[in-house]
């Protein structure tokens, strides 16, 4: 029975002639899993096959790995002198060593296209060999149950492959292409999916699941980001509204009048009305301070005196009239006498007549 195992190509070096040389681990001992179709049992999905170290490291097995052809992918048939020129791209070395549970052997790739393929990243190896399968149930030394074991292992070639099914260590490879496999018999292919920046090899189905989950995670992250932004905007709007209300409250507090301020305003209002009446007695109730000053100036000088004049001008004329009223002795006399403003529009005529009367009365005596 022809079977392949997948291994990895180790460190390589390029000779002056352009040949690529390397060491690789090949067949190993222990349990290997095969598709049932690979080992003639399509009724079984997977078969555990035990490979005893006595078989792997037997003299005949070791000699079979020495100086066998290297191929670029598996050929359709075992390599013989009839097809060697068409499929061989190099050869294995003379010496085959044991490295733990593996066989270790030197390789030399002499074909330029194959060397370029390896340098471009095609670095996995798949060992093609024949063996006899003995179908019997048993337990391997590590405690794993098996359904068959390999004997009479004879290597045929080592193929350079793009990706082996079991990754970078020795494991099951593809079966010889003796027939077109059914979907169940087809070897498992792996894809590399990046998860949190880490490349992970998974099956096609696993890649679909991971991609779907990554899409859902990205969508959830986007929705969360949008929700957080909306929440932040709502908080900012609420903070702005509260700040506005605080400003309004502070403004109202600033406008509040204390008892002392009210007393001062009442006193100032009373003083202004008293000053206004000392110039021109009138009813000033319901008027603002500016309206009182304006009414006094108009009452004293007429509308023409303030036509087109500013409020500052009116205030200044009011102050001048107040000073004139304060220095008028006749007006002051009568204001002090009965606290009522007298008619001052007679330019002192009444005061003059009163003095004449007072003088005549004094002479009559």
Image (spheres, rainbow, N blue to C red):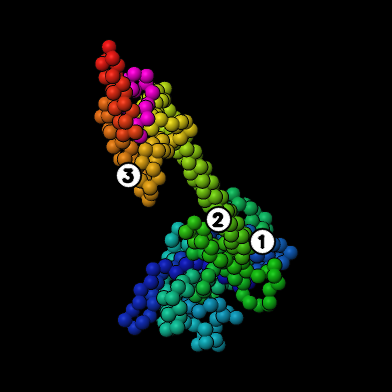
- In front: label 3 or label 1: 3
Q: Which residue is drawn at 61% across and 65% down?
A: 204
Q: Dot 2, crowdedness within 10 Å: few (<14), some or many (≥20)?
A: few
Quadrant location of the N terminus?
bottom right
**Residue 127 magenta:** no
The CA distance from mark 2 to mark 3 is 68 Å
Residue 146: percent from left, percent from top? 64, 56
Crowd tier of the residue under label 3, counting other residues whose Cα lies within 10 Å: few below 14, some 14–19, many 20 or above: few
Q: How many angstroms separate mark 1 from mark 2 (CA)?
A: 43 Å
- Marks 3 and 1 sit apart, C-alpha to C-alpha, by 111 Å
Which one is earlier in the sequence, the residue at label 3 or at label 1?
A: 1
In terms of depth relative to the viewer, which is nearer, 298 or 78?
298
Give how far across and how far down residue 114 sits, in percent. 45, 80
What secondary structure is marked by label 1?
A: strand
User: CB under 8 Å between callouts 1 and 2?
Assistant: no
Residue range corresponding to the magenta coloring: 331-345
Q: Name the residue under label 2.
A: 222
On the image, the x and y values in percent for residue 24 come to: 44, 68
Q: Is residue 85 above or below residue 47?
A: below
Q: In this view, does 14 lie to the left or right of 122?
A: left
* Residue depicted at 31% across the width and 23% down the height: 354
Which residue is denoted by mark 3 in the rendering? 313
């Amino acid at each position: 029975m022809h079977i392949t195992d997948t291994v990895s190509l180790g460190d390589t070096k390029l000779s002056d002639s352009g040949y690529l040389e390397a060491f690789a681990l090949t067949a190993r001992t222990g349990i290997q899993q095969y598709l049932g179709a690979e080992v003639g049992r399509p009724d079984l999905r997977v078969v555990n096959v035990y490979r005893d170290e006595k078989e792997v490291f037997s003299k005949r097995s070791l000699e079979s790995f020495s100086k066998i052809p290297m191929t670029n992918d598996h050929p359709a048939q075992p390599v013989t002198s009839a097809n060697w020129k068409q499929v061989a791209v190099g050869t294995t070395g003379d010496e085959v060593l044991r490295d733990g549970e593996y066989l270790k052997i030197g390789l030399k790739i002499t074909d330029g296209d194959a060397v370029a393929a390896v340098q471009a990243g095609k670095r996995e190896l798949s060992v093609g060999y024949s063996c006899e399968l003995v179908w019997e149930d048993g337990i391997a030394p590590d405690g794993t149950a098996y359904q068959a074991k390999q004997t009479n292992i004879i290597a045929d070639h080592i193929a350079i492959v793009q990706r082996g099914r079991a990754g970078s260590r020795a494991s099951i490879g593809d079966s010889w292409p003796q027939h077109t496999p059914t979907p169940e018999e087809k070897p498992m292919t792996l894809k590399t999916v990046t998860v949190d920046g880490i490349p992970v090899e998974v099956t096609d189905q696993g890649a679909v699941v991971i991609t779907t989950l990554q899409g859902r995670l990205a969508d959830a992250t986007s929705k969360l980001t949008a929700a957080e932004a909306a929440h932040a905007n709502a908080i900012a709007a609420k903070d702005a509204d509260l700040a506005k209300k605080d400003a309004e409250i502070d403004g109202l507090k600033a406008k509040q009048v204390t008892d002392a301020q009210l007393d001062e305003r009442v006193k100032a209002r009373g003083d202004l009305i008293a000053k206004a009446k000392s110039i021109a007695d009138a009813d000033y109730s319901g008027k603002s301070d500016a309206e009182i000053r304006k009414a006094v100036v108009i009452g004293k000088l007429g509308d023409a005196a303030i036509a087109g004049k500013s409020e500052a001008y009116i205030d200044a004329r009011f102050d001048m009239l107040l000073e004139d009223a304060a220095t008028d002795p006749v007006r002051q006399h009568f204001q002090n006498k009965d606290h009522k403003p007298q008619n001052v529009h007679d330019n002192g005529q009444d005061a003059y007549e009163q003095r004449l009367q007072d003088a005549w009365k004094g002479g009559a005596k």
